[in-house]
Amino acid sequence: MGDYDPGLLELAYDAKRFVLYMRSIIEMAPLQVYYSGLLFTPESSLIRGGYLKNIPWVIMEPKVAGVWSSLVQTLEGHTGEVQSAVFSPNGKLVASASTDKTVRLWDRSTGKQCGVLEGHTDNVNSAVFSPDGKLVASASKDKTVRLWDTSTGKQCGVLEGHTGYVNSAVFSSNGKLVASASSDKTVRLWDISTGKQCGALEGPSWVNSATFSPDGKLVASASLDDTVRLWDTSTGKQCAVLEGHTSWVNSVVFSPDGKLVVSASRDKTVRLWDTSTGKQYGVLEGHTGHVNSAVFSSNGKLVASASSDKTVRLWDTSTGKQYGVLEGHTSWVNWAAFSPDGKLVASASRDETVRLWDISTRKQCEVLGGHTDYVNSALFSPDGKLVASASNDKTVRLWDTSTGKQYGVLEGHTDYVNSALFSPDGKLVASASRDKTVRLWDTSTSKQCGVLEGHTSWVNSAVFSPDGKLVASASNDKTVRLWDRSTGMQCGVLEGHRHWVNLAMFSPDGKLVVSASYDKTVILWDTSTRKQCAVLEGHTDYVNSAVFSPDGRIVASASGDETVRLWDTTKKTTIETIETHDSINIRKFSNDGTHLHTSDGILQLESPLHSRGNQELAHTLTHSLYVTDQWITCNMKKLLWLPVDYRLCCSAVNDTGNLIVIGSPSGRVIFISIDFTTLPPAYL
């Protein structure tokens, strides 16, 4: 054999993973994706190390994993959670079923969507290929099973008869029958050639899943009565009840040789059963949440299980030992399936993605530090030196903006933290939590220095008055409460909303508070009298945010009705209604009052009260970073594409507009800083 260069081999591997990683978006904006690929590929990547110098305008890079994980591809396109994903028999396609009422077909080699199967009128709970790959059967909450021709994407049959949701459908090994499991407590058998029902297996409870044995002689069903049941397909009679689970059984599958059954349960376990004796053969324990599905590999040596703990776990069936953990989804994993050759696993998740994993590596996504769960808010301190992030992991974390490193962990809340905000002098942070409290923290020591208790439900936000003497908190108990910061005592309860209060903000002079509520109203309150001084009505859906203009004369509110309204705080009337075509959040007015900073970018205002000419507006917008959908934008032009694991659930930009912090559903908090003097001219 000739000599080979290990470095070139590693470079080739890097190049392959780089292309797979970026393939789904690379045709849309190749230059921006090239930049993103260099920034977000692992630190050990030779490509990153060799070519990162090609983007000198990024002066603070996001912290990324050290090595490639087992994740090969992420398939994006669904607009609802993905309930299941399976490979075609030849391994070339993936079919995914979603609450967006569609089944989507994907080319496994490219990751591109190659078909959308539309026709269901409610959530699609599962989709499966026929043994010859020519058909897909989908099961839906609309009480039907639908058959689709994979070559044309056309519907070629509707199996009707269930009187409840259809939770799963599966073909027999010869492709002649379909078995469907339903909340109507039955498993129904259908003749594919006629579309007629040819059997009904009736049990005592809602059926989540049903599957044929390889020889077609048995059907196994998983039920809400905590059991797995085996049925004789020729007689329709029950022939065994497999008992041992202590909660709902969500799925059941036969091994390739038919000798075992694997079941997944809400009791956090996967169980193996001997089909000849009905006895439990093994218990696979390790998940920390409900197990939603479990399936055998094609050779029967492995089991993959999907869980609400956001992981897929691999198990050795001969030993019952855990073989690997596939981590990366940002929400429940509903389904996992092996490719026919056993080299890949497809996982379907509530995070609206399907992910493909190479199980030969079994490398977990590296923990990057930071939060361990969804990040709900991130905000800069008044001097821009710190960021406070609030998370479902029950903590607030402080970050040094000069380095992007964690500065402190504020621990004490006993439930999700919904928001965290600095005091005007930056010395304190107020955090609002589902645990019904607001907590105050000293930013220099990261120690708790006060607990504000009195709300009777979740606290959604807390904010300091401009002089720092008061705190206003908004809660699901329908109230805004005022607190004396120095004593921690409640000094006012503002009552009047008829539904949850999402947010409260002080006016610049501290004389008013504005509150935004699910009752579709904005209310103004006098902080000295604690009385209501105006109810601003006009929105036709919940109001999620409201802010004062710098002079306090205007309130801007954003609603689920996809409008922003401007209100005159003196006349208590609407000045302007702006159609946004999406539900957005307002963060703040610009300093000159001519535009709003929102979750979707900059919104220019046309009201005469705020119009100061295009020249000043252009100046204020220069060098402004935002996150819009999957992109970091500069001056509203696409700059960097964000891979799915770095997508935002919240973000913040410093006052100079060159540093953006992004909090993600996975718990990552990343910082990216731009040097505008070396940025390509197209973005200036």
Image (tube, rainbow, N blue to C red):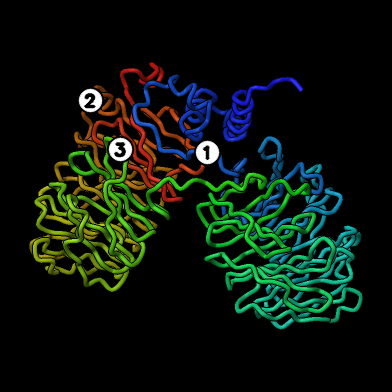
Image quadrant in which the C terminus is located: top left
* Real-space Cα separation, disc 2 to disc 1, in angstroms: 46 Å
- In this rendering, the answer to whether 236 lies above or below 518 is below
- Indicate the amino acid at tag 1: Val
* Real-space Cα separation, disc 3 to disc 2, in angstroms: 20 Å
- In this rendering, the answer to whether 286 lies above or below 20 is below
Q: Earlier in the sequence, mark 3 or mark 2?
A: 2
- In this rendering, the answer to whether 136 lies above or below 26 is below
Q: Earlier in the sequence, mark 3 or mark 1?
A: 1
Q: Position of residue 11 (x, y in %)?
A: 59, 26
- In this rendering, the answer to whether 504 lies above or below 71 is below
**Mark 3 crowdedness (10 Å alpha carbons): few <14, some 14-19, many ≥20:** many
Task: Determine if residue 515 is in view.
Answer: no
Q: Look at 45% across and 35% down and name the residue there.
A: 631
Residue 22 vs residue 502, the one in the foreground: 22
The residue that label 2 is drawn on is 616
Labelled pair 3, 1 in contact (Cβ < 8 Å):
no
Task: Determine if residue 139 is in view.
Answer: yes
- Indicate the amino acid at tag 3: Val
Mark 3 or mark 1, which is nearer to you?
1
The residue that label 3 is drawn on is 653
The residue that label 1 is drawn on is 67
